[in-house]
Amino acid sequence: MMTGCSHPLTHTLPCDILAWPPCGRLALPEVFMRNRRVEPIHPLSRRTVLKSAMAAAAGLSLPPALTSCGYGGSGAGARDKTLRVVSPNIYNFAKLNSLTSLSKEEAKGIGDDAHVLFNMLQNWKKKHPDVELKIEEVDPLTVSRTALLAAKAGNPADVIWVNDLNIPKLAAGGNLTDLGDLPGDWNDYNQQPLTSLASYDGSPVALPFTTDARLTIYDKAAFADAGVTTPPTTWAEFDDALSTLVDAGKGGYGFWAGPFIHTPTMTVLSTLWMLGGDVVDEQGKADLETVEMYKTFEYYNSLINVHTYSPKSLLGVSDQDEYVKMLTDGDVSCQFDGTWVLGQLDNAGLGDQYDVFKTPRPTTDSKDVTLCGFWAAMLPAQERKDDAKTELAFDFAMNFCGPEGQRTYVAETEALPMRPSVLNDKALVEAKSDQWNFVAKYSIDNGRAMPTTEDNALLFDCIQRAFESYLSGSATPQDALSQAQDDFDEGTR
């Protein structure tokens, strides 16, 4: 059983003012809130991830910042004994930084992961006893704005923790340090999220922390009572299973369809990718009027309006708890959702009643893909280059986001790793449930990050409006997607 899976900071927040459209129409997941002049993005020489990895493998010399006192050595940051970190308050870093001891019982009053984060923080501070760590905590929706305003004022932080959705705008604005030459064990990452959303111009600008996955959660008793004993893997098999479940009065299929961030990021994107489509064309521009997008819309329309396997009331749901309640009340017997919901169910004492299977694909030949979201540590670009401070800041980020950091954090929580090496730890995986291992491998093998466009949040808002318009019957898919494309183009001019 996955207990408390996953930590709210592992899934994707809509965003702050860097990305959120003026209309602000999509609802925020409650579980998330507890679930100057800057130089171009070039403070270090730019190299691709591949070149960086090849250099490390060949044993080539590291840049001066990493040879003068060694990676993570006691001499790091010798010219400046202060490290400034801006973090979302869901980590409770500021509180943990103020403590000198913390028992597991005391940690429960702070957060589910407070004890392991405290120990990780203390270990880093022991390595750097002469460094004063200053942590500023802000609302998760304002981290990027805080970082940007500090940069424009000529006083950027040394490390920032930012949600994946905001990385492209920060990077394109020249606000992040190129990390490609630093020893981030870049090959030990799920490469698709790293080389797409966590990179800029072919080089990493962010160190992703842990992640999540989207899949189908189902009521084991409902499936067993209806005689559905094998998890469906394709749309055809799923159609047969849903028909059987509905005929047996067990409830059909739930998926995000209302004014909520998960409608575009979960329901639409995963299906679109399985069909071989995307929302970005070869030139990197948003393209919503594609054959694959029409097929995606038509598939979900068939579930609600043709076969009636899914209740039309899904169009009005904009709250995570309300959505989960449809599953626990039996309105649906399975639903498309994120791994964090497994934690909600377990905390409610219902975890043993539910299990998961991969989201069914259009055909056996279709891609197997799930969207995975993440928070990441980044180093803001600095007007004055300071190799020692860069090394110190990077060491702080690696303390949590490096292979050992992820292994330590994952071992004591139900979070999913972004680094495949974590799953090579035999003792760790044996201590986890079969369900956790299934989901963790699914995320590593098939996880894909958010798309990278001029304005992801505006794009998602436009997609959600189009999706709702079509499924509610107020527009054809052609008109709905045409309007969405026009709205996005207008909003990004």
Image: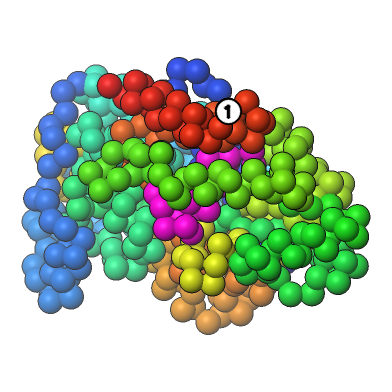
Q: Look at label 1 and name its amino acid.
A: Ala
Query: Is 127 rendered above or below residue 481?
Result: below
At 16% across and 39% down in the image, what residue appears? Answer: 41
Q: Quick check: 177 left or right of 312?
A: left
At 12% across and 42% down in the image, what residue appears? Answer: 42
Q: Which image quarter is the C terminus in?
A: top left
**For residue 233, what is the image quadrant?**
bottom right
Residue that lies at the very extreme toward the bottom in this rendered image:
426
| SS label for mark 1 | loop
Residue 454, position as x, y percentages in the image: 31, 33
Residue 368, position as x, y percentages in the image: 50, 65
Q: Nearer the viewer, residue 340 or 143?
A: 340
Q: Which image quarter is the N terminus in?
A: bottom right
Q: Nearer the viewer, residue 128 or 477?
A: 477
Q: Is residue 264 magenta?
A: yes
Start and end of the magenta stretch? 256-278
Query: Is 148 rendered above or below residue 267?
Result: above
Query: Is 339 rendered above or below residue 228?
Result: above
Q: Which residue is mark 1?
A: 475
Query: Is 258 rendered above or below residue 371?
Result: above
**For residue 51, what is the image quadrant?**
bottom left
Q: Quick check: 80 left or right of 187?
A: left
Q: Nearer the viewer, residue 314 or 410?
A: 314
Residue 9, position as x, y percentages in the image: 53, 45
